[in-house]
Amino acid sequence: MKIATIKTGLASLAMLPGLVMAAPAVADKADNAFMMICTALVLFMTIPGIALFYGGLIRGKNVLSMLTQVTVTFALVCILWVVYGYSLAFGEGNNFFGNINWLMLKNIELTAVMGSIYQYIHVAFQGSFACITVGLIVGALAERIRFSAVLIFVVVWLTLSYIP
């Protein structure tokens, strides 16, 4: 009888981690606030920071063009990230692309949690890095390529290089 009680007690102890792991994910307010602050800082680095930095490195007659290119590509990447970028980058799929379940963010619930942060905050955080990366590339193309070619390049590069 004593051995059976010990075995039952040890078996129940072995099941405790499974019960803890089965708990639903809970969003942490501090983690969410930190991620929102980080997202805002990255966005501030993109529009005023990179646009003005590269505007100061080129000839005076091309400053307005540089500011326009950074701003328009920023907006383009934001739209593409919401339309299909996040779904292809973070959706469950193969090793190269994700799936299209989150196309236009349609199957993401408002209270969906990834780890300890809300999924929409994760979308914004990762999208801000997509924007700043494209801003850096546009700065490298300053005074070398036409604006229409920059837009085509950004769409192709984001889809085939950044997202996978």
Image: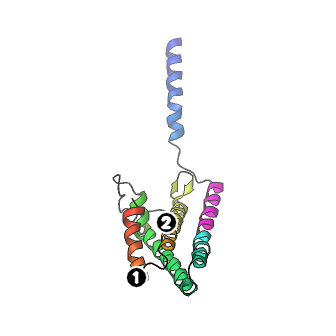
User: Distance of mark 1 from mark 2, alpha carbons?
Assistant: 20 Å
Q: Does the magenta stretch include residue 26?
A: yes
Q: In which quarter of the image is residue 162?
A: bottom left
**Where does the C terminus fall, quadrant-wise?**
bottom left
Q: Is residue 110 magenta?
A: no
Q: Mark 1 points at which residue?
A: 148
Foreground: 102 or 130?
130
Q: Is residue 60 above or below residue 111?
A: below
Q: What residue type is labelled 1?
A: Ser
Q: Which residue is drawn at 59% across and 66% down?
A: 42
Q: Is residue 137 left or right of residue 45?
A: left
Is residue 13 in view?
A: yes
Q: Which amino acid does label 2 sit on?
A: Ala
Q: What span is in magenta?
A: 22-42
- Asked if labels 2 and 1 touch by Cβ distance under 8 angstroms, the answer is no
Camera-nearest residue between 28 and 133 = 133
The percent coordinates of residue 163 (x first, y second) are 41, 62
Above or below for 14 versus 110: above
Q: What element carries label 2?
A: helix
Of helix, strand and loop, which mostly describes the magenta segment? Answer: helix
Res 118 → quadrant? bottom right
Residue 84: numbered disc = none
- Residue 1 visible somewhere in the drawing: no
Looking at marks 1 and 2 on the same chain, the residue that comes earlier in the sequence is marked by 2
Q: Residue at x 61, y 78 (%)?
A: 56
Q: Which of 143 and 82 is in front in this view?
A: 143
Q: Mark 2 points at which residue?
A: 130
